[in-house]
Image (cartoon, rainbow, N blue to C red):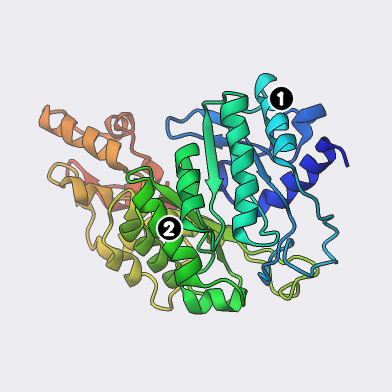
Amino acid sequence: MDVISKAKILGDSGKYDVCGGEVCKPPEITTGLHNIPGIIRAKEKNGRFCSLLKTLQTNACKFDCNYCANRAGNRKSGNQKVSFTPVELSSLFNTLVQKNIVNGLFLSSGVSGDPDKSTADMLKTVRLVRHKYHFGGYIHFKVLPGTNYELVKQASELANRLSVNVEAPGSARLNELSSIKDFKNDILRRQAWIKRLRPGSGQTTQMIVGVNGETDLEVLRMARWEYEKMDLKRCYYSAFSPVKGTPFEDRRKETQLRANRLYKADWLFRVYKYEFRLLKEVMPDGMLPDKDPKVAIAEKTLAEPLELESAGFDELLMVPGIGPVTAENIIRKRESGARFDTKVLKRCGAVMQRAAPFIRVNGERQLRLNAL
């Protein structure tokens, strides 16, 4: 099989590993090398976009994950089992870089044989990319569950970012997904190694939601623990979608709306530093309400609209439509003696349609949402 055919299969097989959440999308050009499914656009921290080759080294896997198209023994998915050699993949990536199609690599793999063998092939690929082709850009290296410490250490010396997916919010939930993976030893221990080997670099992880009855509260508690204990930079939430030929093929597909609500809730305690109890208070049944979590919290906690002339920074952050930058702008305007009105608030960055029900401007309560 030629390399481009392999790239199409392995790029498509890698689509289940979320690397940029809702900001990843297919390339606009759909001809030639651009048509490889693994080429995606991801939003960087500075707001610009980068193009990544996101692929598996192999889609052959001995793991028995009940939801995965690449699981051992799945002959119904239609996925042909193929592997890149390190020479093939590194050469393909270099060609894509030279043609300005991509400027980064996201490398994962199925576990063919054992985690160390598969990781060794991945490392050979990355070494060729770094040393033969002198690529100095971004490489994200997916650490496979069960990989030994020395190989993780080598990956930490070659890649910009390492990650390992927890997949589920706890040991019991993972046991329902796989009979092979051990949550503490195969996953959490590797995360602890990454934290020690790359302090401050920030690893990422992923959880599958809607696969086996887990609640939003379970998922968010696990994410919070990961942020606090594992120096996590970002948790990605992947909505479960059944795959033909797996034990879970008849289970209900989870909506992307649920994953999106989890991202919004995650943002509240990760970025806005909301106390976690505020989220728990709007989840009496363990599930986020069918609305923006920030709106739900504001409706529950803000008994009266906030007076903009006196509200503090943390109070302003409780208002939908007001983020940290907007809150700072409002406080600066207030300290300068400016008189507030709707136009001034919009210039500060407030989204008035969201903020209006929860604030007073010059002592006057704003219109409710349904009146705007």
In this picture, is 80 found above or below 3?
Answer: below
Closer to the camera, 358 or 188?
188
Point out residue 340 in the picture as x, y percentages from the top left corner.
21, 34
Point out residue 249 in the picture as x, y percentages from the top left corner.
75, 72
Q: Left of 109 or right of it: where is 351?
A: left
Q: Quadrant of the N terminus?
A: top right
Q: Secondary structure at mark 1?
A: helix
Q: Left of 15 or right of it: where is 269?
A: left
Q: Residue at 33% x, 62% y: name it.
A: 297
Name the image quarter holding residue 220. Answer: bottom left
Q: Residue at 62% x, 74% y: name it.
A: 178
Q: Amino acid at mark 1?
A: Thr
Q: Residue at 74% x, 41% y: name it.
A: 37
Q: Left of 338 or right of it: where is 245?
A: right
Closer to the camera, 163 or 355?
163
Q: Left of 322 or right of it: where is 50?
A: right
Name of the residue lying farthest toward the front: 150
In this figure, which residue is indicated by the disc labeled 1? Answer: 95
Q: Which mark is residue 109?
A: none
Name the image quarter holding residue 343. Answer: top left
Mark 2 burial class by Cα count in 10 Å: few <14, some 14-19, many 20+: many
Closer to the camera, 113 or 333?
113
Q: Amino acid at mark 2?
A: Gln
Q: Earlier in the sequence, mark 2 or mark 1?
A: 1
Q: Secondary structure at mark 2?
A: helix
Q: CA distance from mark 2 to mark 1?
A: 33 Å
In this figure, which residue is indicated by the disc labeled 2? Answer: 191
Point out residue 359 in the picture as x, y percentages from the top left corner.
26, 49
> Visible in this render: residue 16?
yes
